Image: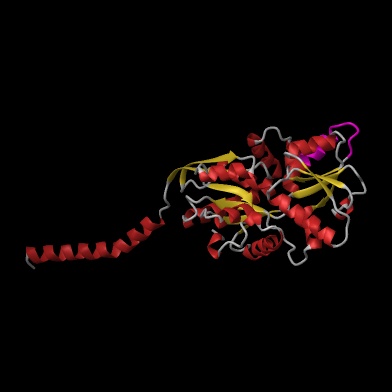
Amino acid sequence: MSETTLHIRRRLCAAALGAALLPRLQTTLAATPRQRDLLTLAGPGAVVSYPLMHMAATRALSEYAGKLQFRLWQTPDQLRTLLVNKDIDFSAAPSTLPALLHNRGMPVRLLNISVWGILWLVSRNPEVKTFSDLAGRELVAPFQRDLPAVLLDTLLQSQADRGLAPVALRRTRDAQDAIALVLNGQAESVLLVEPMASLLLWRAAQTSGVTLHRAQSLEQAWRGSFPEQPSLPQAGVMAAAGVAEDAALCRAVDLAYAESARWCAANPEACADLVREHLPHLPKPAVVTAIRGTRLDSRSARDARPELEALYRLLASRFPQPIGGDLPPVGFYGP
């Protein structure tokens, strides 16, 4: 065999080997996650945010971001501003808010639902054990235009439709104002989101002459009034417009959140220590009680779509404004 022929054969073999390896190389490159310098998670001080705090503390999503941080927000309006300014990438949120934003033209996506029960009735009056017992009485509620306000209004309207006396709602600026009214004896019953319900009970236990009890959860009352919609998909995680189309990242966030949610539920004491790094004013016993009393069960929005659409339809028929008037399209449900 001549030197020229041998050289040609070697070149052909090398070309064949390169062609064989090219698809594998392309697959490897395609499977390599896009590395971002920073991903910002956000949420309120409620239990739905605790898994996000754990994700940031344990440096989850290291394949996708050089740094992962958590940022607190106080009101839904503040969250809207953060989203518009592109200051955050993923956030815990009530299930109605991403639907509203999507229907208003912001291409956000709901990744999961993790909180199915978080609202509690707390009262000074031992006769107030259920929401029906509030008929003809006053209820303090620190909610204005958010999902808890809509759920409460829907529940109380349902009770009125059954002939129960109306409940006099006394709306406060925030949960701290509501707690102060109850502790000072200026209000008898209050509806609070966890961990604020547990905080109120803890503070009452430290205060002489104040006896409170945890009555019914709104979710329990809801099942009685709306048996066709027994589950309340109240809060989960949404993807901001800048990352909503990154399918791999959204799946990774959903999986990491579910893992952290399981950790929080299984380790309430350790989770409470982590939470107090972000919310140092909350006493640990109240945070532990809140974690133990919250149904923290993360399911993808796609899997929870039947429950979500049932809730959206009910709201659309009674209070359409919180979801922007209509159901979001199929592509809204992630990851």
**What percent of the width, then of the height, locates residue 129?**
88, 51
Q: Image quadrant for the N terminus?
A: bottom left
Can you tell which quarter of the image residue 330 is in?
bottom right
269 sits to left or right of 5: right
**What percent of the width, then of the height, locates residue 181?**
82, 36
| Circle count | 0
**What percent of the width, then of the height, locates residue 260?**
61, 49
* Image height of 159 relative to 47, above or below: below
Which residue is at 60% across, 56% downward? 99
Which residue is at 73% across, 64% downward? 229
Whether residue 200 is in magenta: the answer is: yes
112 sits to left or right of 283: left
157 sits to left or right of 270: right
Which residue is at 55% across, 42% downward? 82
Whether residue 212 is in magenta: the answer is: no
Q: Which residues are magenta?
A: 198-211
Can you tell which quarter of the image residue 45 is in?
top right
Please name the colour scheme applied to the rendered image. Answer: secondary structure
Q: Examine the rendering and report whether any part of residue 153 can be seen.
A: yes
Q: Examine the rendering and report whether any part of residue 55 can be seen.
A: no
**What percent of the width, then of the height, locates residue 111?**
57, 56
Q: Image quadrant for the C terminus?
A: bottom right
Q: Furthest residue to the right?
A: 127
Q: Nearer the viewer, residue 99 or 258?
A: 99
58 sits to left or right of 3: right
